[in-house]
Image: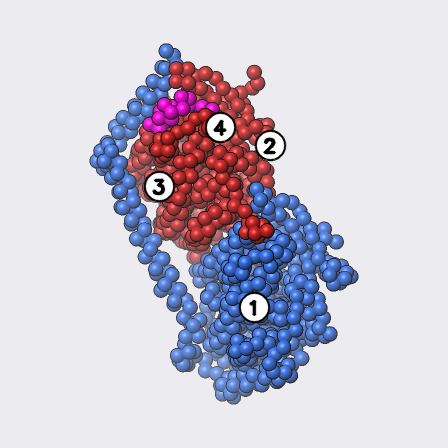
Amino acid sequence: MSFPLLTATAALPALGAIATAAVPAARRTAAKWLALLFSLGTLALAVVALVRFEPGGARYQLTESHAWIAEFGVRYELGVDGIGVSLLALTALLVPFVILAGWHDADPLEDARPNRRWRPTQGFFALILAVEAMVILSFEATDVFLFYILFEAMLIPMYFLIGGFGDRAAPAQFAAKAAGAGDEAAATQRSYAAVKFLLYNLAGGLIMLAAVIGLYVVAGTFSLTEIAEARANGSLSMATNTERLLFLGFFFAFAVKAPLWPLHTWLPNAMGEATAPVAVLITAVVDKVGTFAMLRFCLQLFPEASKWATPAILVLALISIVYGALLAVGQRDMKRLIAYASISHFGFIIMGIFAMTSQGQSGATLYMINHGISTAALMLVAGFLISRRGSRLIADYGGVQKVAPVLAGTFLIGGLATLSLPGLSPFVSEFLVLVGTFSRYPVIGVIATLGIVLAALYVLVLYQRTMTGPVKAEIRTMPDLRVRELVVVAPLIALLLFLGVYPKPLTQIVDPAVEHTLSDVQKTDPKPEVEAAR
Amino acid sequence: MENLIAPLIAAPLLGAAVLLCGGRRLDRAGHWIGTVLAGASFVIGVLLFADLLGRGAEDRTLHQHLFSWIPVGSFRADIAFQLDQLSMTFVLLITGVGTLIHIYSIGYMEHDERRRRFFGYLNLFLAAMLLLVLADNYLLLYMGWEGVGLASYLLIGFWQHKPSAATAAKKAFLVNRVGDLGLSIAIMLMFTTFGTFAFGPVLGAAGDASEGKLTAIGLMLLLAACGKSAQVPLQSWLGDAMEGPTPVSALIHAATMVTAGVYLITRSGAIFNGAPDAQLVVVVVGAVTLLFGAIVGCAKDDIKKALAGSTMSQIGYMILAAGLGPIGYVFAIMHLVTHGFFKAGLFLGAGSVMHGMNDEVDMRKYGGLRKYMPVTFVTFGLGYLAIIGFPGLSGFFSKDKIIEAAFAKGGTEGWILGGVALLGAAITAFYMTRVMLMTFFGEERWRGRETASPAEPSAEPAAEERGRHAEPHPHESPKSMTIPMVVLAFGSVFAGGLFSFGDSFVRWLEPVTGYAHGHPPISAAAVTTATVVALVIGVAVAWLMYGRVPVPVTAPRGSLLTRAARRDLLQDDFNHVVLVRGGEHLTRSLVYVDHTLVDGVVNGTAASFGGLSGRLRKLQNGYARSYAVTMFGGTAVLIAATLLMRAV
């Protein structure tokens, strides 16, 4: 038996979570380093998986299969296609940066009572690694039931991450702030956000559970590959209504997680209240499971129903794009602004998936990756900014570029990536999604370009209000980026630039998977007019 | 030789990377690094030019393919370059004027603590602009297109601590984004029509596409051109862009970037040739902007804003010419090049005047400066003569040809366009004479008058420290600033004649753009005579108003048109009421709707399933944990059950 590489990529962070949680209370720093080490080890394994993956090879590679719950035909089945392996790599890549960026986010407050069992730092980093393990395994699962379990289980550590850890100001500013009342209100807000996150996602999950069981009743197995094969060769046919209902059950859960308008309202609360690294974990990593699952499960299991629902989904995606962008423009809180921008971007991803063209779906997959990197860059720098001043309100800043030019510069680059400037990687994916949509649905494609203009508006307004103008008195002594912070941001920026000019390594891996998915739904790209006329 | 195309772009790109990432230790050498790399790019450009001249007219297209950029299915975008006569012309203009302005900036920005960064941005601009004109497909052109937009954003807002500069930068980027939307839709249309967006296949197959598609593509390209080239209705950003340091105004907002729209239309000639309706819209936009900019230019007292109005108007001429088709393309580009010389020269002259006048920009507080700044006066004067089309100077040749071509459009349209172009020539002569008289002639209105807050806070030693109460002491600028002005003045004088000598410019560009000799309904000599008459009228009226009588230091109230023109013909007021206010209301109400309605409805729907809403309300009262625990309990039971199944 060969080395179970995919299991290892999930087992390593899971082990790391346990190890980190077990570190004694006094050895805080050791816990941090341990978590970082495990996340880097996971990244190394992900790189091995990426290298061993053959773009032209079988659809699912590095597969593993073991019996699990034989009574129900539930198997522990893993395998990655090009889409899965790239998202696996994205997750493994982002987590070390999340850990490094959140280095001091969970330090116990100085006035906290010394308590041997009080170990928030250990808990924080253990939870991050636990989320990583489950997200990675969900990108690898080819058994529907296994996927469902992970899809639900990752909510638990996420809940504690959102509800348990909020923004901190640097100690000096923190002391100046009137302690007490404000903190309590913030804690209530945070707990509201965490529960809202949990309820929305659990509601989606419960409906999906019904659909998962329904699918088992119809198909007699949970194996994605078996069902998809049976669907393709016609040995498994579903009644039209059954297929549609099952599709909706799955899609609803994924649309909550993605999130798609109008199921999006939990995201701004969650991202606003969580610390910046956790917000990155939500939007750049966990939410990607939703869009990934649409591509993998909805289209493969229910091709006919997917086509049936396409017009409605495209309209919802279009609303997400424009609505999310407009709301981003109206935000006063920079983290909520980034959250609404993400909603707009998720609209693009879903639009690209359901445009059912190779450009649209390849673009959507690249979009998931690029959005992860660009949002991480922007959000983490925003987090660094917030930690210096202790406020998320845009109006509390002004003139930062004068006192902290490097911070301002990296913030601008993160912003330019968010508005999809050509030369940075998000442009590639956004343009592919647009062109893929336009070639089949010109009107929707044209309206979606509004998102391009609005993105420029919310990004540049945010930059102008925080970074330019006269220097506000409160930030006159604000320090520029520290070495640790620069280590977080610089590689992300380098990656944005590299993948903006040379995305070919990714498209090579993703394209064959997209071809498979398109043949599942029996769609081919429209022919150009001139060629068609000849 | 084609392997030299990439280094042409790489040199300034390297400069930008080094200067922007290099940190403080490069502060002392930064401006030299930037200037040398810009110069290197120019030298490579000249080498390539020499190579092209050595080839036959039909053999002057070089290709360099670097690598495949975005290959997805049938969608293929490459990082690949095409150098032909059209892009070569731009390369020489961009790197030539660019290098001169780098040299000028060494002196002009000497006292700015962020000079290194300024040169980094300038280098970034050069690289992006070169990419724009050297790309061999529309998507790569788009990268350059937005790249110059970014450089323009960074440079307009270079003095970011001034709120007006930051606002102007944002405005420029946003208005340009609206235009960019046109470019992206045009590329998508090309992809669905031709299956590609590389120049060769698209322009080669343009004849096979339906006229409707070509018209749509053409109009979208025009929208893009309107944004970048500040044409009506996307013109409003250019005046505000004068917030940037003056060398930036000269290079980006006069000589090169703003002319990118003309490049785009000329490059896409094959598409426009098959879409007469789109061409008609192009000439209308050009004609309207030509008058719009000229009228605005007449009313401005700020020397840079008067010149900005003029730029808008002159680009209107170019767009008009490009819309005329093969009878106009060549002259659009010829005017673009001569304009690049004299307008850059005029801006550098304006910068030199401001440099010696405590950064004062109000021409009403100038006067009689010719005695104090002789070099600036002479070079600015030559630029002035060139732009108004004084016979024998650059502008005369290029503008005269455009007016001729406008008449040659034929029919009523031809008469209207020709008439507008002539009227524009008269107004140009008027407002430029006004600038000239107010600045260099008349009384010394700055005597005994303190300067207001400095417009360009770091151009002069500690302008802020010197305070707002000093009387200016006009003086000539240092050599590093005057030499570029002298070189550009040479171009302003001789370029037009050189290009027209034996129709050399026409023969040079014809293989790329095509050329048809236009036949105006009146003789060419008559057109030329009319142009000269228009010029004389314009100059005479200006002299009557600003030369014969003293110029009041505070602006008179003026007629309704003057007042409207001072406010840029109310363009900003319109934008503010319709777009800004409307947009603010929209986003504010949406924020409210999202918070109450969408959130409420979704929660409410859920409530009907399980009393969720009531529970959500209780969350605020501390029930959160108990509820969460319940949910966790459920999930835990579920997982435990599945695990148990296995054990059984």
Q: Secondary structure at mark 1?
A: helix
Q: Are marks 3 and 2 on the same chain?
A: yes
On what subunit does the disc labeled 1 rest? B
Magenta stretch containing residue B303, yes or no? no
From mark 3 to mark 2, how far is it between C-alphas?
37 Å
What amino acid is at disc 4? Asn
What amino acid is at disc 1? Gly
Q: Taking A267 as reference, is A27 left or right?
A: right
Q: Are marks 3 and 1 on the same chain?
A: no
Q: Secondary structure at mark 2?
A: loop
What amino acid is at disc 3? His
From mark 1 to mark 4, how far is it between C-alphas?
57 Å
Q: Which residue is mark 2?
A: A56
Letter of the chain in red: A
| Residue B323 marker | 1
Magenta stretch containing residue A214, yes or no? yes
Q: Are marks 1 and 4 on the same chain?
A: no
Chain B drawn in what color? blue
Q: Which residue is mark 3?
A: A264
| Residue A233 marker | 4
> Residue B414's x, y, as percent?
55, 77
| Residue B14 marker | none
Among the two numbered marks 3 and 2 on one chain, the one whose residue lies closer to the N terminus: 2
Q: Please, which colouring scheme is shown?
A: by chain
From mark 4 to mark 3, how far is it between C-alphas?
37 Å
- In depth, the one of B575 and A131 nearer the eye is B575
Task: Give the number of the mark in front: 3 or 1.
Answer: 1
Among the two numbered marks 4 and 3 on one chain, the one whose residue lies closer to the N terminus: 4
